[in-house]
């Protein structure tokens, strides 16, 4: 177990650029929050408010839910995990790495198609008759890697249900997380991208040109939970804070839908 924890911490340091003296920082910190990349802006703000209210430092780490879940499995010292889909929270629960009683569904989101703001494309009706290949004009569709990134998993399911995914094979720019897909479209390196509605809302460099029917993919659900072995008073207070009206207002500001 010690080797797995050590390996996990080393990978964590490489991925998140944490200083080798990270252990000293942890002694001073009271809470570490691992959250899906798509929640970066909202969760950063929420953690700032919580830290000020509690008088304690809160450390955040944002990446694809799969990356974060694997880090928890390897022993990275997270207290809270917020996933962008049920799959990776289920993964940790099956391994008994979260506190089941603390788990709850926090947010919902939508999958949308985006283009650079300068694109001549204004609207794409997402249906079985949509010819995305022609609209790409030799470019690639930017999206989170469907093999492990939640936004990509939802996106592949939606495209497949519409009968569009097979024609796009070899024409997809697979990214490490949804924010990387957003960046490709922002820079004009991809003519179209598949991201969450909330990602499109944080930048003026892209526009939403299509919305996937809700029936084309499973509901986009963000569960949250305390990591097993980290059920401290601070962690429990943070989970309660996530359920507060104050936090709901912040998430709504960033375009999220509150789970009901």
Image (spheres, rainbow, N blue to C red):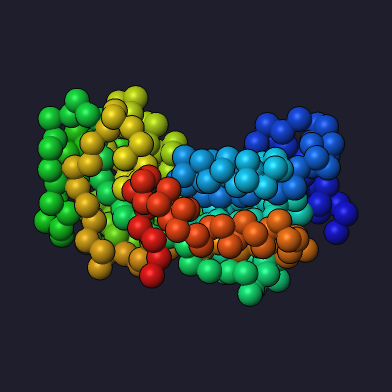
Q: Residue at x 46, y 53 (%)?
A: 246
Q: Residue at x 76, y 42 (%)?
A: 29
Where in the figure is residue 107, as x and y percent of width and height? 43, 60
Report the number of discs: 0
Say if 200 sits above or below 126 in the image: above
Q: Quadrant of the N terminus?
A: bottom right
Q: Quadrant of the C terminus?
A: bottom left
Asked if one can make out residue 56 in the rendered structure from this viewpoint, the answer is yes
- Left or right: residue 105 versus residue 122 is right
* Outermost residue toward the right in this view: 2
- Left or right: residue 158 versus residue 8 is left
Q: Residue at x 31, y 55 (%)?
A: 110
Looking at the image, which is closer to me, 142 or 75?
Answer: 75
Where in the figure is residue 31, as x and y percent of width and height? 70, 49
Asked if one can make out residue 166 in the rendered structure from this viewpoint, the answer is no
Q: Quadrant of residue 66?
A: bottom right
Looking at the image, which is closer to me, 188 or 131?
Answer: 188
Where in the figure is residue 35, as x and y percent of width and height? 56, 50
Looking at the image, which is closer to me, 130 or 13?
Answer: 13
- Left or right: residue 65 versus residue 59 is left
Say if 121 sits above or below 53 in the image: above
Q: Residue at x 88, y 54 (%)?
A: 2
Where in the figure is residue 46, as x and y percent of width and height? 53, 46
Say if 207 sits above or below 91 in the image: above
């Amino acid at each position: 177990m010690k080797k797995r924890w050590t390996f996990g911490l080393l990978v964590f340091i490489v991925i998140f650029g944490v200083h080798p003296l990270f252990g000293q920082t942890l002694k001073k910190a009271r809470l570490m929050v691992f959250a899906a990349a798509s929640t970066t802006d909202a969760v950063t703000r929420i953690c700032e408010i919580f830290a000020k209210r509690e008088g304690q430092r809160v450390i955040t780490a944002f990446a694809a839910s799969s990356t974060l879940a694997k880090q928890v499995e390897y022993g990275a010292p997270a207290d809270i995990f917020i996933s962008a889909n049920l799959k990776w929270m289920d993964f940790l629960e099956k391994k008994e790495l979260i506190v089941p009683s603390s788990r709850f569904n926090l947010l919902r989101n939508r999958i949308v198609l985006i283009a650079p703001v300068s694109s001549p494309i204004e609207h794409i009706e997402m249906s079985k008759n949509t010819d995305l290949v022609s609209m790409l004009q030799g470019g690639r569709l930017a999206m989170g890697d469907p093999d492990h990134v939640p936004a990509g998993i939802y996106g592949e399911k939606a495209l497949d249900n519409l009968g569009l995914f097979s024609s796009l094979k070899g024409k997809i720019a697979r990214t490490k997380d949804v924010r990387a897909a957003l960046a490709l479209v922002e820079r004009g390196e991809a003519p179209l991208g598949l991201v969450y509605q909330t990602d499109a809302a944080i930048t003026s460099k892209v526009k939403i040109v299509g919305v996937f029917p809700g029936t084309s993919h499973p509901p986009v659900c963000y569960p949250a939970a305390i990591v097993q072995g980290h059920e401290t008073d601070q962690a429990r207070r943070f989970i309660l804070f996530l359920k507060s009206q104050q936090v709901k207002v912040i998430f709504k500001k960033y375009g999220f839908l509150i789970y009901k």
